[in-house]
């Protein structure tokens, strides 16, 4: 029997035994934190997933109160809140903005920022479990390179990635908050360290981050369109071209900046023609990528001169 099915039964039995509540909570925390999101990732109904995720997140938060230093739960909460905020709060806010609903866009971005900062803080707590008090050293300044170099193993990469992703997205959702914007060198340094430790992690997820980041940076800052293209190609190679997201990010970040409307249209139409049922492991993210592609194509006149 699958461990994820055993865990709730074990929890009920153990919790009813005097003195065993802590053992039960720890067992359940391990089971949930290691369960992964495979079923949701394979779903082709984003609205169903959107409605289901908050319950799972609140359940994990309840368990975390009993196991506050459980690294697996902290990682799961950081990644879970980041993905939920990005896919189901920030992205709809962007869509509202494109459609002229400025009030809806503002409200959505404010909520996304709060959720993303929660995700960041869970990630920082997880990093502190791994490297005591390291979060206090993850701040802009001369000590930042030493702080990120304290992470030396591939197993550090998931916490580095999700913490930095949440932090970067929070900054993106609140560009008027200059105290938050000033933190941007920190998540970038964390992602750069993760890239050194395991550049293939997440089937190219680290390269996807820089694909989004680099079009807004100059060559002197380590970015630019050529660097973005390199990350794009590497992301596709590592995912064996199974992810549609890199194509959408390249079209939106690089081709719009270059005002290459023909290339933009051609690439996004290829995304829309893709069969999302062909690869179950990436089905949900590919459905969401197709929705983004459709939105961008529908508003192409606003993106090109």
Image (tube, rainbow, N blue to C red):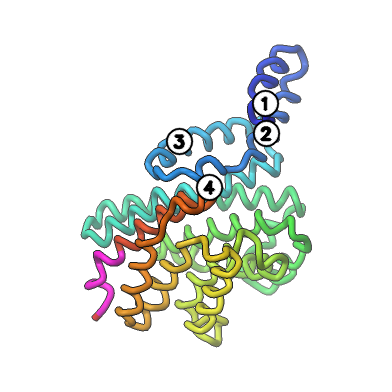
Residue 113 seen anywhere in this rendered image of the structure: no
Residue 83: x %, y % from top left: 50, 50
Q: Kindly check if marks 3 and 2 are in contact, taking CB atoms under 8 A apart as contact.
A: no
Q: Which residue is mark 3?
A: 52
Above or below for 119 versus 34: below
Residue extent of the magenta highlight: 296-304
Element class at badge 4: helix
- Tell me which label, 3 or 2, sits earlier in the chain: 2
Q: Kindly check if marks 4 and 3 are in contact, taking CB atoms under 8 A apart as contact.
A: no
Label placed on residue 31: 2
Element class at badge 1: helix
Q: Which residue is mark 1?
A: 7
Element class at badge 2: helix
Label placed on residue 118: 4
- Tell me which label, 4 or 3, sits earlier in the chain: 3
Crowding at mark 4 (Cα within 10 Å: few <14, some 14-19, many 20+): many
Above or below for 50 versus 215: above
Q: Kindly check if marks 1 and 4 are in contact, taking CB atoms under 8 A apart as contact.
A: no
Residue 188 seen anywhere in this rendered image of the structure: yes
Residue 232: x %, y % from top left: 52, 73
Residue 156: x %, y % from top left: 72, 57
Is 284 included in the stretch rendered in magenta? no
- Tell me which label, 1 or 3, sits earlier in the chain: 1
Q: CA distance from mark 4 to mark 2?
A: 22 Å
């Amino acid at each position: 029997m699958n461990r994820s099915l055993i865990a709730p039964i074990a929890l009920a039995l153990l919790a009813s035994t005097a003195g065993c509540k802590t053992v039960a909570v720890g067992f359940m925390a391990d089971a949930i934190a290691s369960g992964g999101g495979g079923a949701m990732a394979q779903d082709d109904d984003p609205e169903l997933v959107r409605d289901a995720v908050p319950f799972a997140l609140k359940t994990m938060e309840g368990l975390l109160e009993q196991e506050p230093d459980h690294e697996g739960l902290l990682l799961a909460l950081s990644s879970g809140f980041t993905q939920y905020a990005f896919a189901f709060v920030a992205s709809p806010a962007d869509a509202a903005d494109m459609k002229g609903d400025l009030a809806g866009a503002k409200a959505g971005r404010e909520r996304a920022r709060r959720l993303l900062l929660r995700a960041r803080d869970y990630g920082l707590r997880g990093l502190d479990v791994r490297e005591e008090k390291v979060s206090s050293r993850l701040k802009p300044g001369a000590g930042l390179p030493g702080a990120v170099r304290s992470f030396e193993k591939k197993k550090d990469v998931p916490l580095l990635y999700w913490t930095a992703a949440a932090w970067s997205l929070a900054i993106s959702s609140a560009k008027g908050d200059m105290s938050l914007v000033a933190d941007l060198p920190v998540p970038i340094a964390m992602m750069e360290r993760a890239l050194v430790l395991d550049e293939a992690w997440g089937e190219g997820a680290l390269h996807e981050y820089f694909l989004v980041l680099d079009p807004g940076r100059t060559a002197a800052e380590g970015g630019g369109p050529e660097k973005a293209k390199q990350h794009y190609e590497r992301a596709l190679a590592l995912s064996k071209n199974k992810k549609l997201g890199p194509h959408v990010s390249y079209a939106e970040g690089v081709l719009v900046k270059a005002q290459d409307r023909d290339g933009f249209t051609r690439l996004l139409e290829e995304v829309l023609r893709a069969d999302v049922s062909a690869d179950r492991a990436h089905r949900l993210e590919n459905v969401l990528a197709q929705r983004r592609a459709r939105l961008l194509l529908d508003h192409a006149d606003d993106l090109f001169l």
